[in-house]
Image (tube, rainbow, N blue to C red):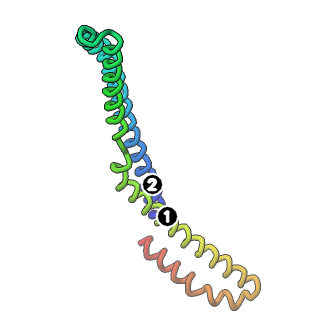
Amino acid sequence: MKRVVRNLTIILRCESLIAQRRLAVARKQIAFIAFAGLVAVLGLVMLNVAAYQALAASLGAPLAALLVAIGNFILAGILAMLAGRENAEAEVAAVSEVRDMAVADLEAELELAQAEVQAVVGDLRRIGRDPLGAASGLAMPLLAALLKHLGKSK
């Protein structure tokens, strides 16, 4: 039973760590995107005015406006790509592996408990059919369990 509780605790802690890491990565991504938006707005105002003034004198107003807009879109795209690089999977891979091992161990424990319960049910059915014969077969396991319990209580 202690192993089951321990494995459940490990699973819960691992899930909590995974969720925390994913939330931290999401916060970083949001911060990058917000910063990209801020840079795009501020850059759009200041850089656009300066670039437009410089280009309008030599290329004309329409071409100057087009070049300034293309530069703004390129900068915003680079910042958005930086935000997309953040990934939680590399950071939570080890925690996921520990969680998966705990789940596998828990499943093995439950299968063992199921097998024990099925064995007891089978023994009880045999007692119903042949009380004296089945009781002699159960005497040794019951005696071993009793001795084990008495040994623990001391």
In which image quadrant can residue 94 be found?
bottom left
What residue did someone put label 2 on? 11
Q: Earlier in the sequence, mark 1 or mark 2?
A: 2
Position above or below: 18 against 37 = below
Between the C-alphas of marks 1 and 2, the distance is 10 Å
Residue 111 falls left or right of residue 122:
left
Residue 89 marker:
none
Secondary structure category for the residue under label 2: helix
Tell me if label 1 and label 2 are in contact, CB under 8 Å: yes
Res 46 visible: no
Say which of 22 and 101 sits in front.
22
Residue 147 in sight from this viewpoint: yes
- Residue at left 27%, top 13%? 59
Query: Residue 95's quadrant in the figure?
Result: bottom left
Residue 93, percent from left and from top = 37, 54
On the image, numbered disc 1 is attached to which residue?
A: 106
Query: Residue visible at 47% across and 65% down?
Result: 104
Image quarter where the C terminus lies is bottom left
Q: Is residue 3 above or below residue 22?
A: below
The residue most toward the front is: 59
Residue shown at 35% from the left, 12% from the top: 62
Vertical comparison of 80 with 145: above or below: above
Q: Nearer the viewer, residue 126 or 54?
A: 54
Bin the neighbour count of mark 2 within 10 Å (Cα to Cα): few under 14, some 14-19, many 20 and up: many
**Residue at the spot 47% in from the left edge and 56% down from the top edge:** 8
Nearer the observer, 114 or 76: 76
Q: Return the x and y of residue 38 as percentages of the image width and height.
A: 33, 20
The amino acid at mark 2 is Ile
Q: Position of residue 6 (x, y in %)?
A: 43, 59
Q: Position of 149 compared to 117: left or right?
A: left
Q: Is residue 143 left or right of residue 32?
A: right
Please say if 147 is above or below 46.
below
